Image: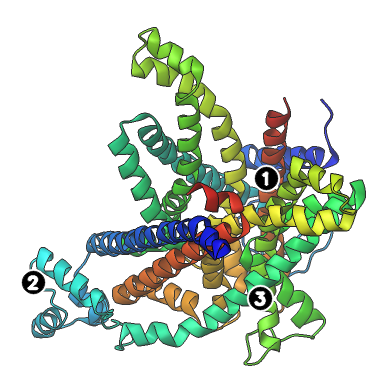
Amino acid sequence: MRLRAAEVVSLAVIAFLAVAALAPFLLAPGDPLAIDPLDSFQSPSTAHVFGTDESGRDIFTRVVHGTGASLTIGLAATAIGLGLALVFGLLAGFGPRWLDFGTTRLLEVLFAFPGLLFALLFIVVYGPGVVTSTIAVGLSTAPGYARIIRSRVIQVRTSPYLEASVVLGRSARFRIARHVLPNVAGSLFVLATLGVGQSIVWASSLSYLGLGAVPPAAEWGAMLSAGRTYISSFWWMTFFPGLFIVLSAAATTVLGRSIQQRGRES
Amino acid sequence: MAGSLSVDLVGAPVRSAARGRLVRWALLRAGGVLFVLWAVATVTFFALQLIPGDPAEAILGGPGSQASAEALAAARAEYGLDQPMPVQYLAYLGRLATGDLGTSYLLRDDVASVILDVLGPTLLLAGLSLLVASLIALGLAVWSTRGGRVAAGLGSLLEIVAAAVPHFWLAISLILLFSTTLGWLPPVSVPGGLGLVLPVLTLAIPLAGFLGQVMREALLDALDSPFVLAARARGEGDAGVFWRHALRHAAIPAIGLVGWAFGSLVSGAVVVETIFARPGLGRSLLSAVQGRDVPVVIGIVLVVALAYMLVTTLTDLADRAVDPRLRARS
């Protein structure tokens, strides 16, 4: 199996992010919250690769230490979205006709809250914060996933081997566990890889708007939100955290696409 | 005489059957739109009942306002909050049916007129962005399918990176480049064409990335398909095959994405209008969310849902116009 250049770069980025998330002190030994007022607003240099912020905190250290929180938010939101979507998809695709009808109508209604609209509604009710914004992003992505999973479940349900399983007298639970879930797992994996990047982007957008994680937490969206005030004079405060969001979203998308393509070719 | 008779015999029934199908489709569709609007209104109403705290207090300026018991009671009576919930719900639906969206808690103004004031700028921004995004996506897709291996790789990478860029970061980077460094364009949205350039680019670039990916895949798929082979066999040249047949095929999945693009534009508008200090639906929504101005949130959610339903209906019509298979089937 030959790796393309984009795939190699993406894998390297993801490996770097994984190290940053699991062992941030390996890459940035400093304290992400250490304040040094005499060293504030330093532009990028050899001492501070990404510069420093308004309290003299090293931005590189903060970006590296923020990786764990930012990726966790992205992964958790994707897991919530996919988990809900799997339940909806199985109910609609495997349940009786009326249940499929009801679920499909429900999804249609949810689709009418496009993009971040549902997330914003959720935040109006439960208030801003890391947990609510993560759940909110997960909820807004669920309908899209659910539609894809439903069609995949129906595809499996109408396949000859599932008919054979019915003829053999297998129970519905057995058929779901043995045939449907393993077949849906592939699509789930691709959706998850493609979705994590999008979730990170959305969650950080909410943080940027002041509805998610709040400063001084070393989370990428929160760092951007804090840097917004100083944007015209101290660009590095927002540029580098944003760069990490773009890198992680692009790398996971490249990986998801190539998994999808390989699956189609084989 | 015989000629016109045969036309009547063959042509008319087919045409009226087609018209009947279209009318039935339109009625079903209108019913669906009404159902979704009712459901969205209901979901929103009951979701907002879950907000902790006294709505009368929110009307009078939040918990810090120290409102007197009389003022609270007066506010409750004014907004009908002293009624039992089913009565409130029915009154709410009744008001919506007549187009009355209520009064804003914070702005003390009619919600419908608040929304009408900001609808125009957002429609202009979103419409221009969709146009620019389609043009960029089309350019990228054509270039990367016709430009050889390097163009193919570079094009798809550009599309993925463009799709991965968050709006707010793109906005900041564009401001840094074009306003702070080069001084070509204003960093906030001033009236007139120049102030629109950066907001439109910010909304268009990520969208172009998504549209481009889908269009390129559909183009490659179309170039491999039997109908392109048939067109070639009929003696159609390279350019004719590409522009007349393959591109039309590639438009179908792109049209299918328009509903999704709408969501991306609405979410993007929240960010872009805030950063560029541009009046609009997104910015009003954000300030209503921050201030928990429930009537404005409900109003904007309903307007967006209605617009979404209209867009998807138009999309279906466009699909039927582009793809003859859909007309034959339904």
Q: Which chain is disc 2 placed on? A: B
Image coords of residue B64 (percent x, y): 26, 78
Secondary structure beneath label 3: helix
Secondary structure beneath label 1: helix
Image coords of residue A183 (percent x, y): 53, 24
State which tag comes first along the sequence, 3 or 2: 2
Q: Quadrant of residue B226?
A: top right
Per the image, the residue denoted by label 2 is B83
Vertical arrangement, residue A240 with respect to residue B81, above or below: above
- The residue carrying pointer 2 sits among few (fewer than 14), some (14 to 19) or many (20 or more) residues within 10 Å by Cα, namely few
Q: Quadrant of residue B117?
A: bottom left
Per the image, the residue denoted by label 3 is B200
Image coords of residue A221 (percent x, y): 57, 60
User: How far apart are the alpha carbons under marks 3 and 2?
Assistant: 46 Å
x 37%, y 45%: residue: A104
Per the image, the residue denoted by label 1 is A253
The residue type indicated by label 3 comes to: Val
State the residue in front, B192 or B188.
Answer: B192
From the viewer's perspective, is A108 left or right of B74?
right
